[in-house]
Amino acid sequence: MLLRTGMILLLLTGMASAQDVPEAGPDIAGLMQSLPEKTLKKLRSAPDAFLRDAAGLIYGFGSEGGITIAGIDTFIAAERARVRAGEMARYLAGDLDNDGSIARDEILVLSNAAAVGRRGQLWLGFDLADADKDTVVSLAELRSHAQGTALEKMSETDAEVLRGFVVFDLNSDGIVAMAEVSAGVSAMIGSE
């Protein structure tokens, strides 16, 4: 595993410029103390996965090989929007008469067409979304339910863990570069 991690580190370090990492190297003790426990646990148990996630975040939502806190916030907003849209689409597929609401008889049709294992989830979500318990989920109720689902899947705690990624900004320029993450992870793995 260390060999594989080392190869990934070399690959990823080569993707970013060497000027992104301070000459003296990362302050490992400070870095480890600054990382949220959840992040540190993931890094220790699966450094390859951590680096893949970091690369996805940096190259997907950053620019010029690095990411700022604004880029991280954009990722958080995009992830919540993806979950919201998926949840809304799942129920809007049951709006058979296209009136913008989903009635109990419409959800029954949708439920019958769903895989057996998903039927319970569909009904539970419908019952949760029907805030006024009138057996019809209005568009406003659906939006509220979808927002709640998005905040459950990407909670504020999860968002803070992602924002904690800025501790890898080893040269304090406000941009977390892949080379900085690679150097930090490599140093942490080597210090254990």
Image (tube, grey):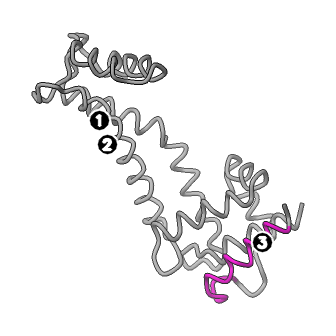
Q: Position of residue 137 (x, y in %)?
A: 22, 21
Outermost residue, right direction? 192
Work out which residue is located at the far top of the displayed protein and give it: 134
- Find disc 3 in the rendering and name its residue: 27
Q: Would you say 33 lies left or right of 136 here?
A: right
Q: In the image, which disc is placed on residue 182?
A: none
Q: Is residue 13 above or below residue 88?
A: below
Q: Residue at x 23, y 13 (%)?
A: 104
Q: Position of residue 189 (x, y in %)?
A: 83, 64
- Secondary structure under badge 3? loop
Q: In what element is the residue under mark 2?
A: helix
Q: Residue at x 23, y 11 (%)?
A: 135
- Amino acid at dot 3: Asp
Determine the main secondary structure of the stretch shown in magenta.
Answer: helix
> Which residue lies under the disc numbered 1?
88
- Quarter of the picture containing the C terminus is bottom right
Evaluate if marks 2 and 1 touch, with contact meaning CB atoms under 8 Å apart: yes
Magenta span of residues: 3-21
Which residue corresponds to the image point at 64% horizontal and 65% vertical from the top-left?
167
- Nearer to us of marks 1 and 3 is 1
In terms of image quadrants, where is residue 28? bottom right
> In which quadrant of the rendered image does the N terminus lie?
bottom right
Looking at the image, tell me whether mark 2 or mark 3 is earlier in sequence order. 3
Quarter occupied by residue 176: bottom right
Q: Position of residue 18 (x, y in %)?
A: 67, 88
Q: Is residue 61 left or right of residue 108?
A: right
Task: Tell me, yes or no, whether the highlighted magenta stretch contains residue 5.
Answer: yes
- Say which amino acid is labelled 1: Met
Q: Position of residue 144 (x, y in %)?
A: 29, 31
**N-terminal of the two: label 1 or label 3?**
3
Q: Residues within 10 Å of mark 2 (few under 14, many from 20)?
A: some
Identify the residue under disc 2.
85
